[in-house]
């Protein structure tokens, strides 16, 4: 039996939240997961305000291992059970890039993912696009010994897979 519930907060301020759980069966494996999905519009507005005060914008976007993987129970546009149905950048992230670019500040896009992601708009509008993949536990340390060869080929557009005979 799986029970879920949602609580909606319309901002990013701290809120008091209580959760009580009692497990009485010695035979059933039980887990509790608390997931927070921030309000997209609020975060996008905060990013635009920060971009307006900045000299340049470095936007980290892409996918997380929480989205792409085998037999995952996720309900997100562009994914079905952990499988990709679309290789486009998720819509809220695309909207974020367009919103911060509208400030007129130079935009650098850092793409984090474990698979190909189409970033056609960023290729045309950003000053640079850097594919960082999943950086692992050493991510952010600045030490790189890459040969310069990527592990995957790049697709020219989000609908590329649909055009393969």
Image: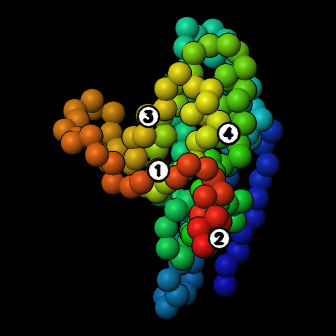
| Residue labelled with disc 1 | 154
Dot 2: within a 10 Å radius of its alpha carbon, few (fewer than 14), some, or many (20 or more) residues? some
In the rendered image, the residue lying farthest to the front is 165
Q: Earlier in the sequence, mark 3 or mark 4?
A: 4
Q: Are marks 1 and 3 in contact (CB under 8 Å)?
A: no
C-alpha distance separating marks 2 and 3: 27 Å
C-alpha distance separating marks 4 and 1: 18 Å
Q: Quadrant of the N terminus?
A: bottom right
| Residue labelled with disc 4 | 94
Image position of 39 with respect to 87: above or below: above
Front one among 62 and 128:
128
Q: Which residue is located at x 75 percent, y 32 percent?
A: 42
Q: Position of residue 25 (x, y in %)?
A: 55, 87
Dot 4: within a 10 Å radius of its alpha carbon, few (fewer than 14), some, or many (20 or more) residues? some
The answer to which quarter of the image holds residue 20 is: bottom right
Image position of 122 with respect to 16: above or below: above
Q: Are marks 2 and 3 in contact (CB under 8 Å)?
A: no
Q: Are marks 2 and 1 in contact (CB under 8 Å)?
A: no
């Amino acid at each position: 039996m799986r029970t879920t519930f949602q609580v909606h907060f319309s901002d990013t301020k701290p809120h008091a939240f209580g959760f009580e759980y009692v497990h009485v069966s010695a035979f059933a494996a039980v887990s509790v997961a608390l997931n927070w999905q921030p309000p997209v519009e609020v975060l996008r507005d905060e990013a635009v305000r920060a971009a307006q005060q900045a000299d340049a914008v470095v936007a980290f976007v892409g996918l997380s291992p929480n989205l792409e993987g085998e037999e995952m129970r996720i309900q997100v546009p562009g994914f079905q059970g952990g499988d990709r149905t679309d290789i486009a950048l998720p819509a809220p992230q695309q909207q974020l890039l367009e919103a911060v670019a509208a400030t007129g500040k130079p935009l650098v896009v850092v793409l984090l993912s474990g698979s190909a992601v189409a970033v056609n708009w960023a290729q045309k509008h950003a000053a640079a696009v850097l594919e960082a993949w999943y950086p692992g536990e050493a991510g952010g340390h600045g030490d790189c010994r890459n040969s310069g060869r990527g592990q995957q080929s790049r697709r020219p557009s989000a609908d590329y897979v649909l055009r393969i005979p």
